[in-house]
Image (spheres, helix red, strand yellow):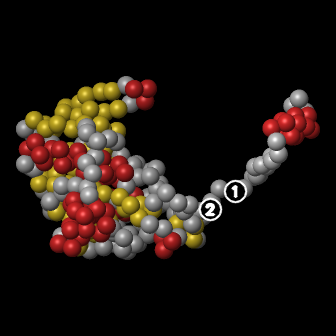
Amino acid sequence: MNIVVAVKHIPSIADDLPVKGANVDFDSVDFVLNWFDVQSIEQAALIKEATGATVTVIGVDLIGELDGSLHLALAMGADKAIKITADDPAADSHQQAKWLSEAIKGLAPDLIFAGVQAANDIDGQIGPILAAYLDMPYIGGVSAVDLNGETAAISKEFAGGVGAKYEAALPLVVGVQASSKPPRYAPVSKVRQVAQTAVIEQVAPTGEASAGIVMKKMSPPAMTGHAEMIEGSSKEVAAKIVELLKSKGLA
């Protein structure tokens, strides 16, 4: 059983994202593994523990920052890591999916996981497009996967707390929203050990594709107003609030 997990490194949103031209200023941000891909890795690790499957993580290295995410994936239980050395920050989902599909074809996967979306673009297209390029069925919004021979029992979440169960034949591409168990914690010491010993296979990107869409501009939210801090005693603050409300015709 071969499981492939497609992963993506994204700018950390713990801090403000500085903008440079038509994209984020990548030199000024830290990069982290996309949270939905963390869920995918956990789901793959659970299946590995149950079946003895081999787990390979693969991602497109758009700006030379992917290694840390691959090290984390290996520390969580993946057996092998591959990075596609694209060095193209502007590559869209279609192009990334094309590169991934060309690299994945030679891995003979039985099951492919991809995070249902990435927090930096909320695009959600990598999984479906990857499935199309590989001529495999796709199901997204998945919250659990169990294998029974050549079929997969899949739980999917809908809005309003509604859930559904599917049965699908392998090979299959799955967009993971949440793993069936919370993602395991990989100690920093283990990640560092992996970083010192692991060998990440590098492959060149092959194949051209485009959504036909070009990002022309990116900008931070426009300032439309400001907050006024009212100081003083409780009575003074209350009086100022009443005065302010009256001036706006609200009292």
Hey, which quadrant is residue 166 in on the image? top left
Report how many numbered discs are placed on residues in the image. 2
Q: Is residue 216 visible?
A: no
Numbered tag placed on residue 222 in the rendering: 1
Position of the C terminus by quadrant: top right
Is 76 left or right of 237, judged from the image as shown? Answer: left
Amino acid type for the residue under numbered disc 2: Ser
Image position, residue 213 (x, y; %):
50, 60
128 or 50, nearer to the observer: 50
User: Residue at horizontal 77%, vertical 49%?
Assistant: 229
User: Residue at horizontal 38%, vertical 61%?
Assistant: 32
Disc 1 packing (10 Å; few <14; some 14–19; many ≥20): few
Image position, residue 205 (x, y; %):
29, 71
Amino acid type for the residue under numbered disc 1: Ala
149 or 94, nearer to the observer: 149
Is 215 left or right of 219, judged from the image as shown? Answer: left
Residue under label 2, please give it: 219
SS under mark 1: loop
User: Residue at horizontal 28%, vertical 46%?
Assistant: 183
Residue 220 vertical position relative to residue 152 in the rendered view, above or below? below
Image position, residue 100 (x, y; %):
28, 61
Q: Is residue 14 visible?
A: yes
SS under mark 2: loop
